[in-house]
């Protein structure tokens, strides 16, 4: 199975600009960063992912969304030695728009609040959650008693308490039963973990939130087709088996 990019483009046309901004804000708070350096006149937003498993998302899907929102085409770089794919937008105007939304420069742990336009609107919250999940969530399938990977799990890890609490409370308001745990990491930062278990919750996620990232979608489609999951396959390998 190949990703049908045309179908994806049709989905994009159904989303308003505000919905796309909410989604992209989620992606940004997952895998994005802002550089705002007046002294050296450097104004840059970067998004980074795994070059092997996130390639389609960062080379086709996210660039299309960024072009719709900002009317700018991002540059794409592959760091082969690091297995990283980078999307870069060099634009003072875009950076200032993001800062005005409340997004921090530098380390995202300094985020103090969720942008108001997302926090106050449940529909936009769902788009935000999809973007955050596409960039930063894990979709795995744990072994059952027979040793077969059939138990879905969606997980989120963050060092930011604002993000952790907003995501947790938002998911509970939709109907998810999920845990929020925390522990001290390296005696410096508190890590927050949100876990969602089971097939019913996976179905609820796909109905209410969903994914755009083929890395996640290919796992779920493989599981739905075969009734089990094979770990350690790449995104491309899963797509070929669908």
Image (tube, grey):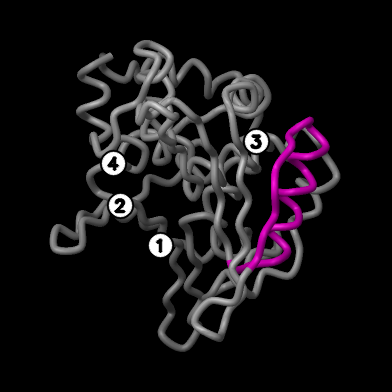
Assign a secondary structure to mark 3. Answer: helix
Is-magenta flag for residue 28?
A: no
User: Residue 23, image x and y in percent?
Assistant: 60, 40
First in sequence, mark 3 or 1: give its number.
Answer: 1
Q: Pointer 1: what residue?
A: 90
Q: Pointer 2: what residue?
A: 75
Q: Tell me the number on the disc at residue 127.
A: 3
Q: Tell me the number on the disc at residue 53.
A: 4
Residues rendered magenta in the picture: 159-182
Farthest residue toward the right?
Answer: 120
CB-based contact (under 8 Å), mark 1 and mark 2: yes
130 lies left or right of 117: left
Farthest residue toward the top?
Answer: 225
Quarter where residue 112 is shown:
bottom right
Circle 3 packing at 10 Å, graded few (<14), some (14-19), many (20+), is many
| Residue at (78% x, 30% y) in the render | 175
Compute the Cα span from label 1 to label 2: 9 Å
32 lies left or right of 14: left
78 lies left or right of 160: left
Compute the Cα span from label 3 to label 1: 25 Å
Compute the Cα span from label 2 to label 3: 24 Å
Assign a secondary structure to mark 2. Answer: strand
First in sequence, mark 2 or 4: give its number.
Answer: 4
| Vertical position of residue 108 compared to residue 222: above or below | below
Compute the Cα span from label 2 to label 4: 19 Å
First in sequence, mark 4 or 3: give its number.
Answer: 4
| Residue at (81% x, 36% y) in the render | 122
| Vertical position of residue 9 compared to residue 113: above or below | above
First in sequence, mark 2 or 3: give its number.
Answer: 2
Circle 2 packing at 10 Å, graded few (<14), some (14-19), many (20+), is few
User: Residue 236, image x and y in percent?
Assistant: 22, 30
């Amino acid at each position: 199975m190949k990703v049908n990019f045309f179908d994806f483009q049709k989905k994009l046309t159904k989303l308003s600009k505000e919905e796309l901004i909410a989604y992209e804000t989620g992606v940004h708070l997952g895998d994005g960063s802002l550089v705002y350096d007046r002294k050296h006149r450097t104004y840059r937003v970067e998004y980074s992912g795994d070059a092997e498993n996130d390639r389609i998302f960062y080379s086709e899907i996210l660039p299309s969304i960024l072009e719709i929102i900002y009317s700018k085409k991002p540059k794409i770089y592959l760091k082969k030695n690091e297995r990283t794919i980078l999307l870069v937008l060099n634009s003072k105007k875009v950076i200032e728009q993001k800062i005005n939304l409340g997004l921090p420069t530098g380390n995202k742990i300094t985020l103090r609040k969720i942008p108001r336009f997302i926090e106050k609107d449940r529909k936009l919250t769902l788009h935000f959650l999809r973007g955050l999940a596409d960039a930063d969530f894990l979709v795995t399938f744990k072994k059952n008693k027979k040793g077969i990977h059939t138990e879905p799990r969606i997980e989120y890890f963050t060092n930011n308490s604002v993000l952790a609490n907003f995501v947790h409370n938002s998911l509970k308001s939709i109907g998810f039963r999920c845990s929020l745990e925390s522990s001290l990491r390296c005696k410096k930062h508190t890590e927050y973990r949100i876990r969602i278990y089971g097939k019913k919750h996976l179905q609820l996620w796909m109905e209410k939130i969903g994914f755009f990232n083929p890395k996640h979608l290919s796992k779920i489609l493989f599981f739905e087709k075969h009734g089990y999951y094979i770990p350690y396959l790449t995104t491309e390998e899963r797509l070929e088996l669908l």
